[in-house]
Amino acid sequence: MSMSPDQIWHQFGPVAIDLGVNLISALVLIVVGWSVAGWAQRVVRRGLSRFKDTDRTLIGVLAGIVRYFILITVLIMVLARFGVQTASILAALGAIGLAVGLALQGTLANIAAGVMLLFLRPFRVGDYVSANGHDGTIDEIGLFTTEMTTYDGIYQSVPNAAIWGGRIVNYSRNRTRRHDILIGISYQDGIDHAQSVLLEMLRADARVLDETSGPAAPQVLVRALADSSVTLGLRFWTSNDDFWPAEFDLCKAAKQTLDRAGITIPFPQRDVHLHDVRGAA
């Protein structure tokens, strides 16, 4: 038996209207959500870019996280409009995430370590560091690896987890560094005279910081009474940029200064005593 138009509308009309409303609502949610996600990504990127110390990699990661969080939220809202049980979808996504996490736990560990390095910033691009046995100048800090160049020009790509899991020494972080140069003089030479000429040498070098411009004034200290010499320690501070040039130059200058002052840097030596035991019986 055929149905009249009124009967068809009465039976299927509400369903069609409800479906149409849901389709329109879903379309509006998708359009608005897509626009809001893009807008939020740009806002986060611009906001973080205002801070000069913020790493560009970190800016992109945070902006992407905000965008995809909004898109996933919109997708769940759209599915809920059509009566889909979102709880089961979230449970499935959680199970998939767990499986992927177990399969990629090494990679995820590198990502987590990379995020920590970017947030806590134990070093920056251009710093010279010793990180868990890996030494070099930092070229790039990525989400998976950190790229560095060793002092002899060799490229290194180190997984972030290998860096974050150990001790990090940053030689470039502080503006000044202390030198400790050890020099031995003969026991026959005057200690006070040697200290005086070496201290004068340090104060004459413009790179050596005094008590007004650095942590402490230069010092020449008696560090040890060794087997063959009296060990003097030259302790002084320079800027980080001057550290190695000053170290090399003042090592050479200390030898020349002692030579001009007639002070000897002795070779290791032993006193040998011979006893005549022929008469002993």
Image (cartoon, rainbow, N blue to C red):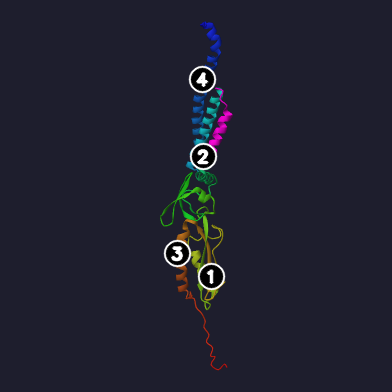
For the residue labelled by badge 3, is the local secondary structure a helix, a strand or a loop? helix
At label 2, counting other C-alpha atoms closer than 10 Å, the crowd grade (few under 14, some 14-19, many 20 or more) is few
Neighbour tally class for label 3: few under 14, some 14-19, many 20 plus, Cα within 10 Å: few
Query: Mark 4 or 2, which is nearer the eye?
Result: 2
Mark before the other along the chain sequence, 4 or 1 = 4
On the image, the x and y values in percent for residue 28 come to 51, 22
Q: Earlier in the sequence, mark 4 or mark 3?
A: 4
Among the two numbered marks 4 and 2 on one chain, the one whose residue lies closer to the N terminus: 4
Q: Quadrant of the C terminus?
A: bottom right
| x, y percent for residue 78 | 53, 25
Number of residues whose C-alpha sits closer than 10 Å to that of mark 1, classed few (under 14), some (14–19) or many (20 or more): many
Closest to the camera, between mark 4 and mark 1, is 4
Which residue, given by chain and number where applicable, does mark 2 sit on?
100
**Residue receiving disc 1:** 232
Q: CA distance from mark 4 to mark 1?
A: 86 Å
Choose mark 2 or mark 3, whichever is in front. Answer: 2
Residue at mark 1 to residue at mark 3: CA–CA distance: 17 Å
Question: Can you identify the residue that label 3 sits on?
Answer: 249
Amino acid type at circle 1 is: Leu
Mark 4 secondary-structure assignment: helix
Please give the residue where the numbered disc 4 appears in the rendered image.
23
Q: Secondary structure at mark 1?
A: strand
Callout 2 amino acid: Val
Q: Are marks 2 and 3 in contact (CB under 8 Å)?
A: no
Residue 227 vs 33, above or below: the answer is below
Q: x, y (%) of residue 23?
A: 51, 20
User: Is 216 situated above or below 270?
Assistant: above
Q: What residue type is disc 3 on?
A: Asp
Q: Earlier in the sequence, mark 2 or mark 1?
A: 2
Residue numbers of the magenta segment: 82-100
Identified at 55% across, 16% down, the residue is 18
